[in-house]
C-alpha cells in the first residue's frame, strides 16, 4: 500500500513512518501543506493521512482540492481538535475517516484496515438500489430522488448507503456510528444526529414522501412512508 503522510510534527512523523514501514507499507512524507498537496495531485496513492493544522495549506483545503480530481483515494484526517464541529468539517471536506490526537499506533492501524475493507467491497455488489423514487448508484457513488441528482458529501453518501442496504430496519445510533464511521460509540458525540439531519434535508426536502424516520428511543429507519 502506498501512503502519503502530510504531517508537520517530527516526532509523530518518525513514529508513524517506522510503524507503517514495519507493516510493509510504502510511505512518502510531506512536512507542510503546500508540498503535500503537490504530491497528492502529482502521484498515485492508496491512502492519504493528513493533519488538519499544517503550515502553508491546511488539511481541510488539501482534502477539498484532492477530492476535486480524485474520488477514490482514501483520506484519513488527523486532528487535535476533537469537537463535533471540527470532525464534521473534516468529513464534509471529503475525508473518509478521522483520528483524534493523541492516538495509539494500533488505533491508526485499525483505521487503515477499515478503510482498506471499505474500498475492497466496492464493485462486489449490484450497481444500484431503488427505494421508492430514491436511487443509489454504487459504482458512481451518486444518488437521485425522482430522477433529480442529490449532491452528497462522502460521509453523507456512506450514511445513505448504510440506510439503503438496511432499508426497513431500525438502526441504532451505535450501529450507525460503528458501521459508517467504524468507531466505538461515544456518548459525548452527536455526530450521527448531525449527519442524519444533513441527509434528511437533502433526501426528504421538497418531497411528498419522507424516507428517513426517527424511531424515538431506538434510532432511525429508512422506509417508504405508506401515508
Image (tube, rainbow, N blue to C red):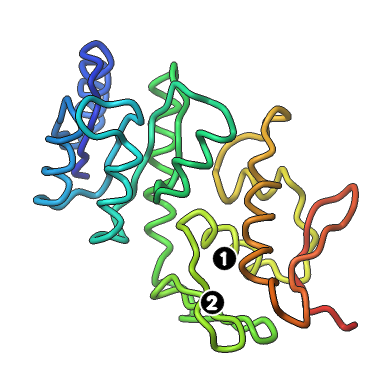
Q: Position of residue 207 (x, y in %)?
A: 72, 80
Q: Position of residue 216 (x, y in %)?
A: 90, 52
Task: Describe residue 150's horizontal placement relative to residue 57 as left or right.
Answer: right
Of marks 1 and 2, which one's residue comes earlier in the chain?
2
Task: Describe residue 17's horizontal placement relative to residue 117 as left or right.
Answer: left
The crowd level at tag 2 (other Cα within 10 Å; few <14, some 14-19, many 20+) is many
From the viewer's perspective, is residue 138 above or below residue 66?
Answer: below
Task: Describe residue 196's horizontal placement relative to residue 77 as left or right.
Answer: right
Q: Quadrant of the C terminus?
A: bottom right
From the viewer's perspective, is residue 112 above or below residue 154?
Answer: above
Q: Secondary structure at mark 1?
A: helix
Count the labels in the image. Answer: 2
Which residue is under mark 1? 161
Q: Do the residues under discs 1 and 2 have CB atoms within 8 angstroms? A: yes
Name the residue rendered at 17%, 34% in the picture: 27
Closer-to-camera residue (97/169): 97
Closer-to-camera residue (120/158): 158
Closer-to-camera residue (22/111): 111
Q: Residue furthest left?
A: 42
Q: Quadrant of the N terminus?
A: top left
Q: Secondary structure at mark 2?
A: strand
Task: Describe residue 12's horizontal placement relative to residue 93 as left or right.
Answer: left
| Separation of residues labelled 1 and 2 (CA atoms) | 7 Å
Say which mark, if any, is on residue 136: 2
Amino acid at each position: 500500500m502506498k501512503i502519503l503522510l502530510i504531517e508537520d510534527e517530527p516526532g509523530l512523523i518518525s513514529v508513524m513512518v517506522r510503524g507503517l514501514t514495519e507493516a510493509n507499507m510504502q510511505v512518502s512524507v510531506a512536512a507542510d501543506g503546500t508540498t503535500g498537496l503537490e504530491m497528492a495531485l502529482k502521484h498515485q496513492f492508496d491512502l492519504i493521512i493528513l493533519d488538519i493544522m499544517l503550515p502553508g495549506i491546511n488539511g481541510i483545503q488539501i482534502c477539498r482540492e484532492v477530492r476535486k480530481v480524485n474520488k477514490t483515494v482514501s483520506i484519513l484526517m488527523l486532528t487535535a481538535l476533537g469537537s463535533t464541529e471540527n470532525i464534521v468539517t473534516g468529513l464534509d471536506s471529503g475525508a473518509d475517516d478521522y483520528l483524534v490526537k493523541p492516538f495509539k499506533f494500533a488505533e491508526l492501524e485499525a483505521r487503515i484496515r477499515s478503510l482498506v475493507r471499505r474500498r475492497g467491497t466496492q464493485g462486489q455488489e449490484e450497481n444500484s438500489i431503488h427505494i421508492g423514487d430514491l436511487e443509489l448508484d454504487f459504482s458512481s457513488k451518486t444518488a437521485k430522488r425522482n430522477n433529480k441528482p442529490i449532491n452528497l458529501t462522502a460521509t453523507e453518501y456512506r450514511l445513505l448507503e448504510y440506510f439503503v442496504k438496511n432499508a426497513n430496519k431500525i438502526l441504532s445510533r451505535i450501529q450507525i456510528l460503528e458501521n459508517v464511521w467504524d468507531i466505538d460509540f461515544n456518548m459525548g458525540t452527536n455526530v450521527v444526529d448531525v449527519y442524519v439531519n444533513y441527509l434528511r434535508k437533502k433526501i426528504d426536502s421538497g418531497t411528498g414522501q419522507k424516507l428517513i424516520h426517527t424511531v424515538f428511543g431506538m434510532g432511525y429507519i429508512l422506509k417508504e412512508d405508506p401515508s
